Every structure is written in C-alpha cells, then in structure tokens.
C-alpha cells in the first residue's frame, strides 16, 4: 500500500468552506500597550483578568517552542489535549459517514470523542506484546477511514510503540495519523515532532497535564504542519485558553530545574515500586513502562482494588480493557506515597 495523502480530500467540506470567527483580539492585537481598548465590551477596570486572553497564546507558544525546539507556527494549544483531539475529529470526520482506527487497549477518549461525533471506530487490538498489528490495520482501512490513533507511550500499558511500526503506518496509511505523546516526557525516546517535515499526515499531541504538573490548568498541545494547523485553527474557539492558565503555565515552565528533580524522583520511585511489586506473590506480571505508571497483572484485580481502597489508596482497575484481564494501573507518587503503598501491599492477604 502506498500513501496517497491529500489533505484537501480529508477535510470536511463544510470546514474547508468555513469563514472563521474573527474576534476583537484578532482584528487588533491586544498586546499593544498604551492604547485605549474600547473594542471588546470588556469592563475597563483592571483586576488581572478583565481583558480577553490572547487567542493565539503567543507568549506561551514561544516558551513551548523553545522548550520543545519546534517552530511556533507548528504549535496549536487547546484546553487540554482532549480539546485538541476533539478539534481534530470535527475537522476531518463527517458524522455518520467516516471512520477512524483505534488500537485497544488504549486511551478511552478516542472512542468517546468518536461516539460524540458519530464516527465509526474500527478497533484493531494490539498484539500480545502491545504493538500494532499493521497487516490487520491495512486490511480494514477503506476510503472513509480518515484517521488513526497511536498512543506512545501507550495508556494503560505504558510501553512505547516501535519506531519501525510507526514509520510503516505513517508512510502507508492514507489519512491523518495522530501520535498521542502524553507521557513522552517520562522517557528518553525522542518525540515524533522532530520528524514533522518527513510526514505530512502527522499530528502529535502532548500535554502539560502529566510530567509538567499542570493537569488543573488544562493545556494540551498539537504539533503539525502549517497546512493542518490552518484547518484546526478555523474551528478552535477563539479564547480557548484563559488568561490565568496562560500566565500560570508561563511561570511554571520557567521552573525547569524543579521539574527535572521531580522527574528524577518519579523515576526512582517507579523503580523502587517495580522491585517491591516483583516480590509479591499475588503480582503475576508487570509490563515494562516508559511512563509514570505501571500496569500490573494480579490474581484478583477487584479484590486487590477494594483492599487498597479500604486502606485509603485509589488505583485504577483496568480489567475491563481487552488484554488487561485482572490488571491494575498504578500511578507513581511521591517517595512517601510509594512507601505507604508498598507497606500496605505487603500486608495484604
Ligand atoms: C492523560 C492523558 C491525556 C491528557 O489529556 P489532557 O486533556 O491534556 O489532560 C492525553 N492522552 C493520554 C493518553 C492520556 O493518558
């Protein structure tokens, strides 16, 4: 199969024709100082958030651009990566007509967003080693299949998807390939965003919710070609990132030293937790993880989940996902939390 990628044929016709909303801050750049702003019906009394936010988030994008070494033109920000994923669905998939490929066990939001947008999901299970089955994928793709979702490192299994397989999919799949790198900052693997130039059908999503410690601010990132981002920008709500989130994220991203200490700590706690888990009789398997969580197979997931809950520890039972029978997903906490978890686990019977 060869990749006959043509962006124009993938965009929904109504979106291709759409004239985007032009906000007050589009027509005049709100960053200009010493002006009197009487264009957006705001309350003029300054309280730090009486003005609309920058719809293009220029300062924040510049910071992310420096951190990630990607041009600001190749960055789009969303109210969490969940908003970014929803924009992608609405740009490319015609409700009731188009389909997408999802590879379970994986992040549940792809299916939910597909359902909300009335898009058929072609589910193709990962192999036993949690890698995509490319032959089966290509046999299920048809002319209505617009997008394919890869999650690497994958949630809930924690493993990276092999580079060769991703390359094979990117070069052969005729639609948009989304690589969800929510957990990329926890591993050594280079982001696929470095290879945007090679693959015109690639969108990478990342988030400030996990390693960067800003889940409460809701900031998601898409990296893609200018052509793809032009389409997504047509449907992005103009003021989707609020003033306080933009400001707070900038402050937080300045603290790179603190962040690397935190990431180092998390790695240490992960390896302590792994070693200790291996010694427990009711733990049957631990999947090697490139993320900040472990998926462990136990003797009886429901029992172990409830026992932990009684001791005040909340984990996630992932047993209802395919290939995850009796599996529990545990996020890596602080040193103290990890010690408490281990001591509770050791005393279960
Ligand atoms: C947590 C997570 C996200 C993050 O979503 P946000 O909306 O940015 O908080 C995205 N993808 C995966 C696979 C995740 O696990």
Image (cartoon, grey):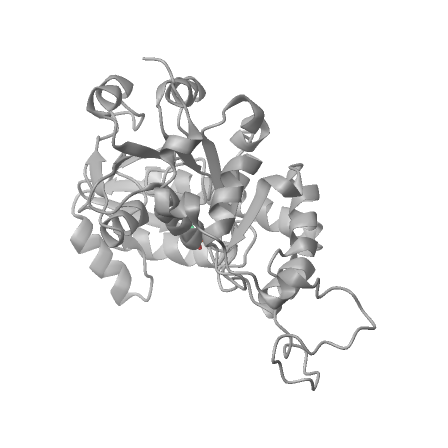
Percent x, y of residue 192: 52, 30
Left or right? Give the position of 31 relative to 220.
right
* Figure check: 245 above or below 56: below
Whole-percent x, y for residue 62 in the image: 70, 48
Q: Is residue 280 visible?
A: no
* Whole-percent x, y for residue 144 in the image: 25, 32
Relative to the observer, which residue lies in front, 103 or 224? 224
> Quadrant of the rendered structure where residue 296 is?
top left
Q: Residue at x 36, y 18 (%)?
A: 172
Foreground residue among 263 and 177: 177
**Foreground residue among 81 and 209:** 81
Judge from the rendering whether residue 196 lies leftward or rightward of residue 179; answer left or right. right
**Location of the N terminus (image quadrant):** top left
Q: Residue at x 42, y 46 (%)?
A: 17
Is residue 30 depicted above or below 255 in this figure? below
- When asked about the image quadrant of residue 171, the answer is top left
Q: Position of residue 23 (x, y in %)?
A: 57, 64
Tell me if residue 69 can be seen.
Answer: yes
Q: Nearer the viewer, residue 118 or 154?
A: 118
Q: Residue furthest top?
A: 1
- Left or right of residue 156, residue 273 in this image: right
Query: Where 296 sits versus 197, above or below?
Result: below
Residue 33, quarter of the rendered image:
bottom right
């Amino acid at each position: 199969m060869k990749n006959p990628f043509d962006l124009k044929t993938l965009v929904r016709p109504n979106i291709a024709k759409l004239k985007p909303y032009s906000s007050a801050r589009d027509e005049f750049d709100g960053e200009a100082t010493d002006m009197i702003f009487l264009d957006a019906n705001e309350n003029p009394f300054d309280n730090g958030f009486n003005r609309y936010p920058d719809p293009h988030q220029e300062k924040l994008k510049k910071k992310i651009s420096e951190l990630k070494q990607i041009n600001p033109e190749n960055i789009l920000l969303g109210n969490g990566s969940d908003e970014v994923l929803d924009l992608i669905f609405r740009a490319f998939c015609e409700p009731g007509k188009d389909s997408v490929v999802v590879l379970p066990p994986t992040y549940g939001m792809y299916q939910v967003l597909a359902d909300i947008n009335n898009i058929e999901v072609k589910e193709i299970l990962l192999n036993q080693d949690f890698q995509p089955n490319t032959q089966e994928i290509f046999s299920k793709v048809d002319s209505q299949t617009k997008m394919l979702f890869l999650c690497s490192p994958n949630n809930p299994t924690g493993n990276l998807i092999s580079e060769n397989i991703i390359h094979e999919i990117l070069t052969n799949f005729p639609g948009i390939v989304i690589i969800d790198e929510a957990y990329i900052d926890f591993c050594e693997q280079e982001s696929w965003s470095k290879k945007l130039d090679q693959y015109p059908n690639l969108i990478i999503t990342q988030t400030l919710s996990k390693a960067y410690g800003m889940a409460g601010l809701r900031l998601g990132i898409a990296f893609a070609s200018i052509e793809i981002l032009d389409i997504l920008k047509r449907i992005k709500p103009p003021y989707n990132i609020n003033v306080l989130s933009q400001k707070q994220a900038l402050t937080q991203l300045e603290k790179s030293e603190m962040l690397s200490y935190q990431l180092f700590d998390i790695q240490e706690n992960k390896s302590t937790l792994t070693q200790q888990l291996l010694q427990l009789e009711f733990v049957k398997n631990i999947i090697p993880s490139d993320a900040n969580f472990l998926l462990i197979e136990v003797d009886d997931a429901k029992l172990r989940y409830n026992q932990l809950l009684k001791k005040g520890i909340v984990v996630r039972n992932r047993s209802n996902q395919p290939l995850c029978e009796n599996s529990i997903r545990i996020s890596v906490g602080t040193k103290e939390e990890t010690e408490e978890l281990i001591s509770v686990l050791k005393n279960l019977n």
